[in-house]
Image (tube, rainbow, N blue to C red):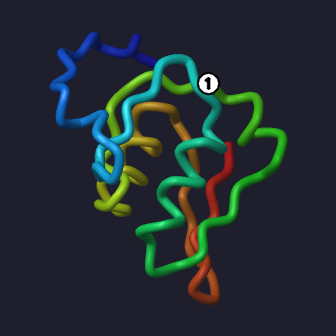
Amino acid sequence: GAAPKRVQLDPEQNRPGSDWFVMRDAPLGDLVAKMRRFSRSPIDVDTTLAGDLRLTGRFRVSATEDSLAMLQQGYDLDISRANGVVRIEK
């Protein structure tokens, strides 16, 4: 995959309660935990993948579909939906 691009971070993105989540080499599980707070559907992710896959980037966790699309494109993950549950797999 392509190398992550460096992004300028604005201070407001790191405020508590902000719907932006900035990650620097952080596990996928951290992002999924934040996304679950905003998602209308449950999000299921393989435990090993959640711990092993490290992400760097800026995710708007309140925009679940945008974040899922970024994961799909940027990290070559498979996003599927069944019975109202979003599943993230490699």
In which quadrant of the rendered image does the C terminus lie?
Answer: top right
Q: Residue furthest front?
A: 16
Taking 78 as reference, is 70 left or right?
Answer: left
The residue positioned 48% from the left and 19% from the top of the image is 24
The residue positioned 28% from the left and 49% from the top of the image is 18
Give the image location of residue 40, x and y in percent: 44, 80
Q: Secondary structure at mark 1?
A: strand
Q: Residue furthest right?
A: 48
- Tell me the crowding category of disc 1: few under 14, some 14 to 19, or many 20 or more residues within 10 angstroms, Cα based: some
**Quadrant hosting residue 82:** bottom right
Question: Is 1 above or below relative to 83?
Answer: above
Q: Is 49 in front, or is 7?
A: 7
Taking 8 as reference, is 26 left or right?
Answer: right
**Quadrant hosting residue 20:** top left
Question: Is 78 above or below relative to 51?
Answer: below
Q: How many marks?
A: 1
Question: Is 33 above or below relative to 57?
Answer: below
Question: Is 75 above or below relative to 41?
Answer: above
The residue positioned 53% from the left and 44% from the top of the image is 31
Give the image location of residue 44, x and y in percent: 68, 64
Give the image location of residue 85, x and y in percent: 61, 78
The residue that mark 1 highlights is 54
Give the image location of residue 35, x and y in percent: 48, 58
**Quadrant hosting residue 64:** bottom left
Report the amino acid beneath label 1: Arg
